[in-house]
Image (cartoon, rainbow, N blue to C red):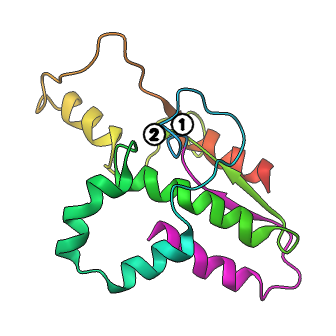
């Protein structure tokens, strides 16, 4: 979905002669397999066209078996495909489309807009917070010195607007 969906959006945008800005939303974790992450687009682990062709012919069962070898040092397919998609966006936009890539971390409830605490789903950290608040989940295993990189949704949206 990350790669093919973005490719379809890019193809559509190329047909828009008056397009002012295209903002691709990636993730701060697209390159989480690196010790240091700079504001650059890193070479993809696999060319996006090859990945699209690969997913078109491989069976789900075989894909499941080879995925651990394919994604290598990435922890999951989400971050792996986000890394590939970033390079696709840069490749397709080069001299053709005005684009920016933003990399928010984990998006959580709003800080102020539209009101403090607003969220439209119970995915990710929101599900944990809700379960803890209701007493359904009383303990959770974690790393004592770990950091939850959660950004309020209004910060993320405002960042995207500014990028545009």
Q: Residue at x 27, y 53 (%)?
A: 68
Q: Is residue 97 visible in the rendered structure shown here?
A: yes
Q: Residue at x 31, y 49 (%)?
A: 122
Q: Is residue 120 visible in the rendered structure shown here?
A: no
7 drawn magenta? yes
* Front residue of 149 and 90: 90
Q: Looking at the image, is 6 positioned above or below residue 31?
A: below
Could you say where residue 17 lies in the image, as x and y percent from the top left?
87, 85
Q: Quadrant of residue 92?
A: bottom right
Q: What residue span does the magenta drawing correspond to?
A: 1-27
Mark 2 or mark 1, earlier in chain: 2
Could you say where residue 65 lies in the image, as x and y percent from the top left?
19, 63
Asked if labels 1 and 2 touch by Cβ distance under 8 angstroms, the answer is yes
Q: Mark 1: which secondary structure?
A: strand
Q: Quadrant of residue 129?
A: top left
Between marks 2 and 1, how big is the CA–CA gap? Answer: 5 Å
List the single residue furthest toward the bottom.
Answer: 15
Left or right of 67: which side holds 99?
right
Q: Which residue is mark 1?
A: 152
Q: Residue at x 37, y 53 (%)?
A: 71
Q: Which residue is mark 2?
A: 108
Left or right of 101: which side holds 124?
left
162 drawn magenta? no
Query: How many neighbours does mark 2 have within 10 angstroms: few (below 14), some (14-19), or many (20 or more)?
Result: many
Could you say where residue 142 lies in the image, as x and y percent from the top left?
24, 20
């Amino acid at each position: 979905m990350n790669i093919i969906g973005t490719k379809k959006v890019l193809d559509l945008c190329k047909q828009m002669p008056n397009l002012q800005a295209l903002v691709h939303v990636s993730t701060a974790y697209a390159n989480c397999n690196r010790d240091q992450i700079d504001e650059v687009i890193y070479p993809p682990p696999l060319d996006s066209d090859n990945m699209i062709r690969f997913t078109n012919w491989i069976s789900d069962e075989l894909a499941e078996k080879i995925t651990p070898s394919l994604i290598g040092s990435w922890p999951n397919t989400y971050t792996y495909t986000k890394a590939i998609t970033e390079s696709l966006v840069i490749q397709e936009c080069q001299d053709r489309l005005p684009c920016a890539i933003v990399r928010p971390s984990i998006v959580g409830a709003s800080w102020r807009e539209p009101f403090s605490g607003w969220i439209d789903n119970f995915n990710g950290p929101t599900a944990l917070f809700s379960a803890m608040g209701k007493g359904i989940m009383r303990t959770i295993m974690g790393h004592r010195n770990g950091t939850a990189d959660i950004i309020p949704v209004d910060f993320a949206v405002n960042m995207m607007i500014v990028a545009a």
